[in-house]
Amino acid sequence: MIRRMLPLLLAAAPLAAQDGVFLTAGRVLAGQPDEASWRLSLQRDLIGPLGVDVSATKLPGSRPGDGDLYGVGADMTIFSASSSVPTIFVGAAAGLGFGDQKRVWTSGSVGARITVLQVGTARLMGEARWRNITVPGRDGFELGVTVGYRRAPPPGARRPETAGLWMPRSTSDALRTAGIPDLKARVLGAVVTTALEEMGQPYVWGGTGDGSGGFDCSGLIYYAYAQQGIRLPRTSASQALAGVAIRKDIDLLLPGDILTFAERGDGVTHVGLYVGEGRFIHSASRGVRLSRLAEEDADGRWWLRRWVGVRRVVE
């Protein structure tokens, strides 16, 4: 079966109309005995974190060995662009059975999948789905392993995924209140928005979002500023010398400030972009994420104790 579906996967890869192509090999645990299921999916991002998977699927009938079910389906997804946040989906499928299972069938399902491994644009994921189907004796769970790829965005493209469950209040208004001129406030607001739109992207050493499939810490800041026409040095050590130094005081921070961190000794080894309300966005080992400069935040506490400086690029 996999030999027949793999050429379809490869043929679908160049299509410009999709953002991902995945093949899922699963086990249908309902009924006796449990049997293999197969699904070839094309993913497409819609708006924000929402997307859709369109798929061709093969399922076992209620009498194993006497006929299989073939059909097409669609899943509405949320967070499918993210490799660090589980994808939640709800879907429907319909098709025909063959052999002794000759019938029209329909199904509804809900489930989740999570990325286990990502290398560049390629992903390996685990999936669990509960399916209700009109074929007697086949309601129940499917567990699957999914392999495929998510297309890297072209240079300058905006990612459709969200910045998580938190968004800052109007960044531009906060900057104007702090005395930043209107034009510069709008530029810095766009820098922060650009960085937040990359939430969930993987950590990739040397990555700047230009087809590399992710970011390193300085690459994220380099990218966010570059989209607004501002060129920064590329490395964390050189970004620690960009702009002007600001006193290391949370109350003095403004969105768009570059925070510098020293994980070992005094040399800067990591940078993050302050986004407001005590939070900064950065690309670390678990990908692009938000952290808080606060002792009560477990992750933020680690970075707070290694925070060594602030650089302001636009005044």
Image (cartoon, rainbow, N blue to C red):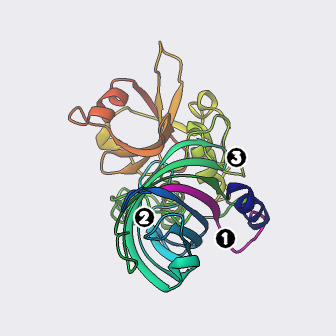
Above or below: residue 221 compared with residue 249: below
Point 48% across, 31% down: residue = 260
Q: Which mark is residue 212?
A: 3
Element carrying mark 2 = helix
Segment colored magenta:
13-27
* In this view, the mark in front (1 or 2): 1
Instruction: Assess disc 2: are there few (<14), some (14-19) or many (≥20) residues with their C-alpha within 10 Å of its C-alpha.
Output: many
Q: From the viewer's perspective, tell me whether residue 14 is left or right of residue 288.
A: right
Q: Where on the picture, by quarter, is residue 135?
A: bottom left
Q: Earlier in the sequence, mark 2 or mark 3?
A: 2
Tag 1: residue type?
Gln
Q: CA distance from mark 2 to mark 3?
A: 30 Å
Could you tell which of marks 1 and 3 lies nearer the N-terminus? 1
* Viewer can see residue 135: yes
Q: Residue at coordinates 31% horizontally, 37% vertically from top-left?
A: 293
Question: Residue 300 is drawn in which quadrant?
Answer: top left
Taking the spot 50% from the left edge, 55% from the top edge, the residue there is: 26
Pick the front one: 232 or 98: 98
Residue type for callout 2: Ser
Q: Which residue is mark 1?
A: 18
Judging from the image, what secondary structure is the residue with disc 3 in? Answer: loop
Residue ranking furthest to the bottom: 104
Cα distance, mark 1 to mark 3?
Answer: 19 Å
The dot on residue 172 is 2
